[in-house]
Image (spheres, grey):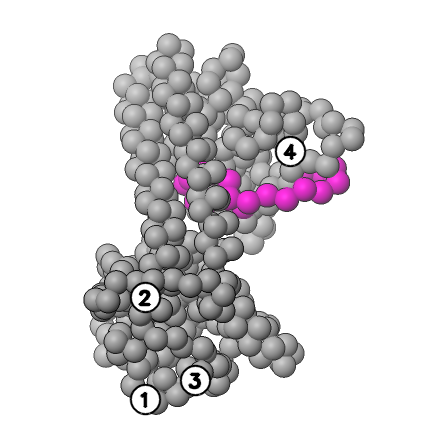
Amino acid sequence: MTTLGQLSKSGVIEFSDGYRTKGSEQSESGFRILRAGDLHSGRAHFDGPDFVDGGFAGAIGAKTVRRGDVALTTKGSVGRVALVGDVPTPAVYSPQICFFRIAQPETLHPRFLLYWFQSMQFQQQASYLMAATDMAPYLSLRDIGAMTITLPDLRTQRAIAEVLGSLDDKIAANERVVEVSEDLLRTRFLAACEEADQASPVGSVVDFNPPRTMPFEAEPVYVEMKDLGTHTSLIKTWSRRAPSGGVRFQHGDTVIGRITPCLENGKIGFVDFLPEGDVGIGSTEFVTMSMRNDLPTPLSFLIAEHPTFRAEAIQLMVGTSGRQRAGAKDMAQIELPLPDSATLRSLGQMAEAIFAFLARLRDENRALAATRDALLPALMRGERSVTSPAVVNTDCTK
């Protein structure tokens, strides 16, 4: 047993927080800023909008993002962790992230460290340290250095990393299939729209905030803004609560965020998880979209994602600068070059097949994640034995 600070002093790891960017250093290009929200599903995602000008590379120094780093959020949503794979663009860590760089992979396996940050040993220490201050959730570099870590031999570390990593790799592969499938669907839909002869009001084929009768005895599904992905059909999580205010939705509807900045960021979700006839509740900051004329239901998601629809909806936003909203009635009047009914139906049927496939991938990922989460504590505590090949792989991302 040792501490992260001792591992740093002995040269096994290096760790530091991110770069504190001044307003004058921000730019439209250069080093992309990796923020806490960019760490999810165990990976770092490089699609944020903020940059540090490349001329400040000297000041940034070692705080650039590198392949093989383990990144941990230490402010706000403490404990979100990711292993950095390929870095597609120069990037720098924000101050809300602490990064760990393995200098001696023959002593500490990076992926073992990733899973240790998800273990009870880390979580208990982090909870205690955060409770010792009246500030918002926060772990200082001193706190992190004082944390105790149980470090088994490298063979065991690697074996644990391989067992849990194989599950995470399959989850990541499924997520990539989802992304590619949806990109294909978007491309086909946009191409069909470009060939349309004339524009029509979206309300001619879509009902906005249609009335839904809430079953009296039911405790409905409730979806919040945080549950929606960005340009993805899958609603990530939901809860149940007593019926109250909010837009209603049912299987086959699409919900879209109508408030700044959710509309700009493409907060959209297709409802594919409710039983037929059940009714859910969405945030009051949603608009529900439902296809008319018995057209295939996934078309509402494709229309909600259409760049012209979103651009026009953003122009319709009214209210104070911090809480601008787009109204459902105004959205219905937006005109799009929509294909004829036959083409729409054909595209919708293709979308139905793809969405059904994506739903199966979602179910598989939940099962994989549940297996990983059940194995992780037993493996980290040594309650389950693992074996690993004798050859040590020092590639930090494998």
- Reading the image, the residue beneath label 2 is 158
Q: Amino acid at mark 2?
A: Arg
- Reading the image, the residue beneath label 4 is 280
> 248 or 74: nearer the eye?
74
- Estimate the x, y position of residue 343 in percent, counting from the top left: 35, 13
Start and end of the magenta stretch? 227-246
Q: Quadrant of residue 393?
A: bottom left
Q: Is residue 296 left or right of residue 185?
A: right
Q: Amino acid at mark 3?
A: Thr
- Secondary structure under tag 1 reads loop
Q: Which sits earlier in the primary sequence, circle 2 or circle 4?
A: 2
Q: Quadrant of residue 85?
A: bottom left
Assess whether residue 237 is covered by the magenta stretch.
yes
> 135 or 160: nearer the eye?
160
The N terminus lies in quadrant: bottom left
Circles 4 and 3, Cβ within 8 Å, touching? The answer is: no
Packing grade of label 2 (10 A; few <14, some 14-19, many >=20) is many
Packing grade of label 1 (10 A; few <14, some 14-19, many >=20) is few
Q: Main secondary structure of the magenta part?
A: loop
- Seen at 49% across and 65% down, the residue is 383
- Estimate the x, y position of residue 154 in percent, counting from the top left: 31, 73
Q: Amino acid at mark 4?
A: Gly
The mark found on residue 10 in the picture is: 1
- Secondary structure under tag 2 reads helix
Q: CA distance from mark 2 to mark 3?
A: 18 Å
The mark found on residue 2 in the picture is: 3
110, above or below 206, in the image:
below
Q: CA distance from mark 2 to mark 1?
A: 21 Å
Q: CA distance from mark 2 to mark 4?
A: 44 Å
- Seen at 36% across and 42% down, the residue is 174
Q: Which sits earlier in the primary sequence, circle 2 or circle 1?
A: 1
